[in-house]
Image: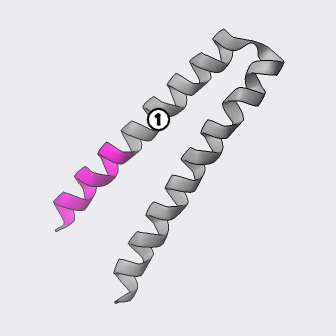
């Protein structure tokens, strides 16, 4: 496996870990600020993650 492929795999793993951590924070955040604010936070994080995936895939296709 060459270095570029390994870097791509490591970057995907890192993004996945950040998403899991963000989703684990929501229940604890709900206790502090309320369910509605925590739900809004989860929606914003989900939208940001979706946007990052779309941009990453579009850039990946344009470079190939």
Q: Is residue 64 above or below residue 50?
A: below
Q: Is residue 15 above or below residue 50?
A: below
Give the left or right position of residue 56, taking residue 39 as reference.
left
Stretch of the chain drawn in magenta: 53-63
What residue is drawn where x is 26% and y is 56%?
A: 59
Residue 33 horizontal/vertical position (percent): 78, 15
Give the left or right position of residue 23, taking residue 11 as reference.
right
Give the left or right position of residue 8, taking residue 20 as reference.
left
> Is 23 or 61 nearer to us in this picture?
23
Residue at the outermost right position: 32
Residue 60 horizontal/vertical position (percent): 25, 60
What residue is drawn where x is 17% and y is 59%?
A: 62
Mark 1, residue position: 48
Q: Considering the numbered disc 1 on the image, is that residue within a helix, a strand or a loop?
A: helix
Q: Is residue 24 above or below residue 35?
A: below
Q: Is residue 57 above or below residue 4?
A: above
Q: Is residue 30 magenta?
A: no
What residue is drawn where x is 57% and y is 26%?
A: 42
Q: Is residue 55 magenta?
A: yes
The rendered magenta stretch, by its main secondary structure, is classed as helix
> Is 23 or 11 nearer to us in this picture?
23
């Amino acid at each position: 496996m060459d270095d570029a492929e390994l870097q791509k795999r490591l970057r995907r793993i890192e993004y996945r870990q950040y998403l899991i951590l963000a989703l684990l924070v929501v229940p604890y955040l709900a206790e502090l600020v309320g369910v509605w604010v925590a739900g809004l936070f989860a929606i914003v994080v989900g939208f940001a993650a979706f946007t990052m995936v779309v941009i990453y895939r579009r850039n990946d296709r344009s470079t190939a």
